[in-house]
Amino acid sequence: MVVNVQLEPLLIEGLDIRRPLIMAGPCSAESEEQVMQTAKEVAAAGVKIFRAGIWKPRTRPNAFEGVGSVGLPWLQQVKKETGMLVATEVANVKHVYEALKYGVDIIWIGARTSANPFAVQEIADSLKGVRIPVFVKNPINPDVDLWIGAIERINQAGITSMAAIHRGFSSYDKTIFRNAPHWQVPIELRRRIPELPIITDPSHICGNRDLIFDISQKAMDLGFEGLIIETHIDPDKAWSDAKQQVTPRSLKEILDRLIMRDPEIDADLMLTLAGLRDKIDKFDDRLINLMEERMKVAEDIGHYKKENNITIFQNKRWDDMLRSRIILGNKKGLSEDFINRVFRAIHQESINKQTSIMNND
C-alpha cells in the first residue's frame, strides 16, 4: 500500500535536534509549583523539551482528567525560566486552539485519539495554515495502517514536521508490560515511512519505572530517534500513573547509561533481528501464561489427592506421560533430551505444589 506523506526533516524552532531527542516531564501538570520544580530539575538533566499533560483522557469517569487550560500559563513560565520548549497532548479542536494560544511548541495526538479517524480529521482541519511539529502516538491496537492513516491526515493538513510516538499496545494477555511493545509494528512503520522519526515512550509501555531503561536502550538499539519519559519530582504522590514516572535524578541516570550506536550500520539487519526477537518474547509470554494455567490444574489434582488419600507420585502415569511427550516432541523436530529435561522440570514443579498442599492443614 502506497503511503502518501510529504515530510521535511524534523525542525523545531530554537532547538538543535540531535539523536536522541528527549522529552521529559510529568504525566500530568498538577500545580504551578510541581510543574516549575520538575521543569528546573529536568532542565538540569540536560533535557530540552518539557512534556506535561494538561488534558488527560482517562479510562473511567471521575478520575483526574487534568487541570485543563489553567495549566497552560505554567508551561509558558517553564519556557521563560528554563528555555526549554514545551509539549502537550491534544484530543480535540478546543485543545488545539488553547495550546496554540499559549505558545505550546509541540503537540501530540494520543493513542485513544489516533484510533479515531473522525477525531484526527477534525484536529487536522484545525491545523491548516499552522506551522507546528505534531507527533502521533500509535493507536491502542497494533494496527500499523490505522497509525499511518492518522499521520497522513495530519500531514495532508500541511504539517510537514512530524514524528511518531511508539507507546505500546493494549493486550488482553498478561505480560510484564502495561502496553505490549510489539516492536514489529514501529519497525514496519519505519520500513514504510523511513523518513519519519520514531520516538519511543517507555513509560507507557512499561507501566513500571524499573523497566524503563531496558526499553529505552532497545529503542536506541533499533535506531529510533528519541524517548519521551514521564518524570515527576515525587512520583509516588503523582495524581496519575505514579508507578511509571521517574524522578529527575533517575532520568539523568537512565540517559547517562544509554549506549548510542550508529543507526546507519546494519540498520536493516538490526530491524529484522528485532522483529524476530519480538516474536520470541511473545511466545515466551504465552509459554509462561500456559505454565501458570498448567500449575493451577496441578494444584487442583493435589487437592483431589489429599481429599481422597491418594499418593502424590504415580509412577505409571509419569512414565506414560513422559513417553507420549517425547514421541510428540520428535514429530515436531524437538530432541528427546530437550523434551526430557523440560518435562522433568515441569513435573518437579507440579510435585512441589502438590506436596505443599498435602502438608498444609
Image (cartoon, rainbow, N blue to C red):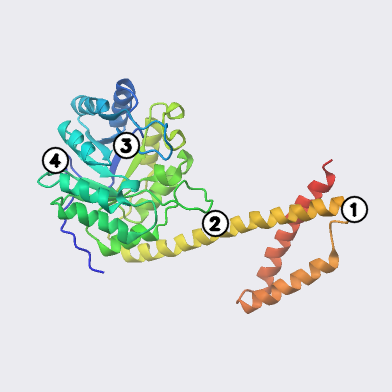
Instruction: Find the distance from the CA under tag 4 to the CA under tag 3.
Output: 18 Å
Relative depth, front residue between 360 and 149: 149
The residue that mark 1 highlights is 309
Q: Which mark is residue 23?
A: none
Relative depth, front residue between 154 and 85: 154
> Where, quadrant-wise, is the C terminus in this rendering?
top right
Name the mark nearer the viewer: 1 or 2: 1
Q: Which mark is residue 285?
A: 2
Marks 3 and 1 close (CB-CB < 8 Å): no
Q: Secondary structure at mark 1?
A: loop
Occupied quadrant, residue 69:
top left
Occupied quadrant, residue 146:
bottom left
The residue that mark 3 highlights is 24
200 w.r.t. 65: above or below: below
Which of pointers 3 and 1 lies earlier in the amino acid sequence?
Answer: 3
Instruction: Find the distance from the CA under tag 2 to the CA under tag 4.
Output: 43 Å
What residue type is disc 2 on?
Asp
Side of 223 relative to 314 (left or right): left
What residue type is disc 1 on?
Asn
Identity of the residue drawn at 37% across and 33% down: 231
The residue that mark 4 highlights is 13
277 w.r.t. 109: above or below: below
Name the mark nearer the viewer: 4 or 1: 1
Label 4 neighbour load within 10 Å: few <14, some 14-19, many 20+: few
Label 1 neighbour load within 10 Å: few <14, some 14-19, many 20+: few
Instruction: Find the distance from the CA under tag 4 to the CA under tag 1.
Output: 77 Å
